[in-house]
Amino acid sequence: MMHIMDQKQYTQALNDFLLTGRPFLGICLGLHALFERSEEAPDVKGLGIIPGFVKKFDIDLSVPHIGWNGISIKKESGLFAGLDQSEKFYFVHSYYVVSEDESAVLTTTNYGVEFVSGIQKDNITATQFHPEKSGRAGLLVFKNFLESAYESVNEQPGSIAVSGKTKLTKRIIACLDVRSNDQGDLVVTKGDQYDVREDGNVRNLGKPVELAERYYMEGADEITFLNITGFRDFPLEDMPMIEVLKATSENVFVPLTIGGGIRNYTDKNGKTYTALEVAAEYFRSGADKISIGSDAVLIVEEYLKSGQKTGQSSIEQISEVYGSQAVVISIDPRRIYVTSPEDVKHIVIETKEKGPKNEQYCWYQCTIKGGREGRDLDAVTLARVCEELGAGEILLNCIDKDGTGAGFDIELINLVKSAVSIPVIASSGAGCPEHFYEVFKETQAESALAAGIFHRREVPIVDVKTYLKDKVEIRAIL
Ligand code: 1PR
């Protein structure tokens, strides 16, 4: 950020603005930039308005720190007027600020360490969390900031200082598999073990924007759109998905992830687009994270063959420009049963869910093109290499469980989770609120995703959260 601002000669203008005493609100990098230097870019100088620096998390927990966490308010401020003390805000970052000016510290948050999550010094306010993605609580912060822009902050009804450790919540994610039906309408669909057709027709479970808005209102902590035919359609030609994102982000203030078709592509006229360009269009349209499925498998296969990073893959390019927290890898694995661990060169587990011939062992085969093609690669290796290439989160589906309502594949989730240090989203198989509790109790997954039970209104999100309340740290529905 500072490099580009320097290049475009914006830095002086911003500095001049800050010194005029006019109100300023920085978010995330907008907080980091106020400090003197950052481990993220050691050769670039920060604005240096606040003494201190930016440091990478060095903790025994998944990094990036992704999700909803609390704030301990360290001094009275109008910014949090009217907010409940238990409110959570959305964080997504691998670096945090270390302020050498104690008096500037507005809030702190706990994640392995207690770090500064907000500062306020005269006219300058900045937060590590994203108010624009923090639902009602975030919108109230903006309202308070705008109102305080016209009055002295100290004249605002202040919030009371809160102390005590904050906790990161487990996230409940609603997933919308989107594709065109046979009539050409973009619909939310849902398969059983990835088969989305019923009596020959694509199942139609609703309109993407409407459903996303409903889930936001019902308390979803995040929303994911998967363009499930993206592997054959090119997203920049398939403009409806971009329109869906734009329309959704007008009314939905929680993080949005979009996947499907993110790869390098040459169109019928020979024009080449990079995966980075596709991702950029999605980010500009309101996405916070992009998810890569099929392309990740092909990238890892290439990497294992050559043993070298090229710097050119979609994972490397997008994480380099937008940060690893913006790159999710969606894995579509399927169980392959074997009679002995020596039968294959893949990572094999002894399983409690035996195979059709009573096999005791299985490995998890990666697939591409929405499960249509199995590859000679296991899900654990895929996850590990993707983390090394710069991915920031794993969306772990399971074809065997998808749409069954039989519960998550706990064995798969534990296997992949133990192989990576980035957050994992458990997906596929949720059938009731108890399944969410089971996945959080039996595994270290940071979040759980479901589709069918939400679309068919069998289990509303509020029921999941009500069941989890007092058992698991979650964002309350206020
Ligand atoms: O390969 O980069 O173009 O991305 C395509 C994306 O579309 C991938 O993320 C892939 O998972 C997804 N996808 C492709 N085909 C299907 C399909 O269903 N035929 N959907 C598909 C994957 C799985 C989950 C689902 C959970 C929870 N759907 O997204 O939402 O399994 O379902 P449940 O709660 O009903 O059990 P690329």
Image (tube, rainbow, N blue to C red):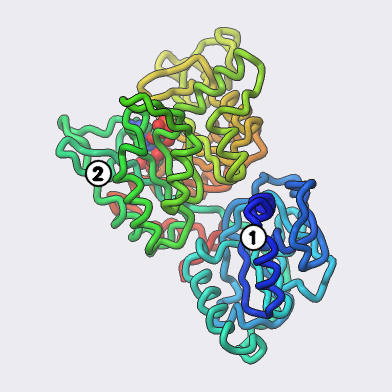
Q: Residue furthest right?
A: 100
Q: Residue at x 56, y 10 (%)?
A: 344
Q: Secondary structure at mark 1?
A: loop
Mark 2–mark 1 Cα distance, whole angstroms, equals 41 Å
Q: Residue at x 79, y 46 (%)?
A: 43
Q: In the rendered image of this protein, does residue 289 appear above or below residue 333?
A: below
Q: Residue 415's image quarter?
A: top right
- Determine which of the numbered discs, if any, sits on residue 10 in the image: 1
Viewer-proximal residue among 305 and 375: 305
For label 1, being within 8 Å of ligand 1 is answered no
Q: In the rendered image of this protein, does residue 359 appear above or below residue 6?
A: above
Horizontal side of residue 5 vs 257, given as left or right: right
Q: Secondary structure at mark 2?
A: strand
Viewer-proximal residue among 43 and 214: 43
Residue 222 in picture, x, y percent from top left: 47, 54
Q: Which of pointers 2 and 1 indicates the residue nearer the eye?
A: 1
Residue 286 in picture, x, y percent from top left: 44, 53
Q: Callout 2 environment at 10 Å: few (<14), some (14 to 19), or many (20+)? A: some
Residue, disc 2: 186
Residue 187 in picture, x, y percent from top left: 25, 44
- Amino acid type of the residue that numbered disc 2 sits on in the rendered structure: Leu
Q: Residue at x 57, y 70 (%)?
A: 87
Q: Residue furthest top?
A: 343
Residue 155 in picture, x, y percent from top left: 63, 92
Q: Residue at x 52, y 42 (%)?
A: 425
Q: Which quarter of the frame holds ligand 1?
A: top left
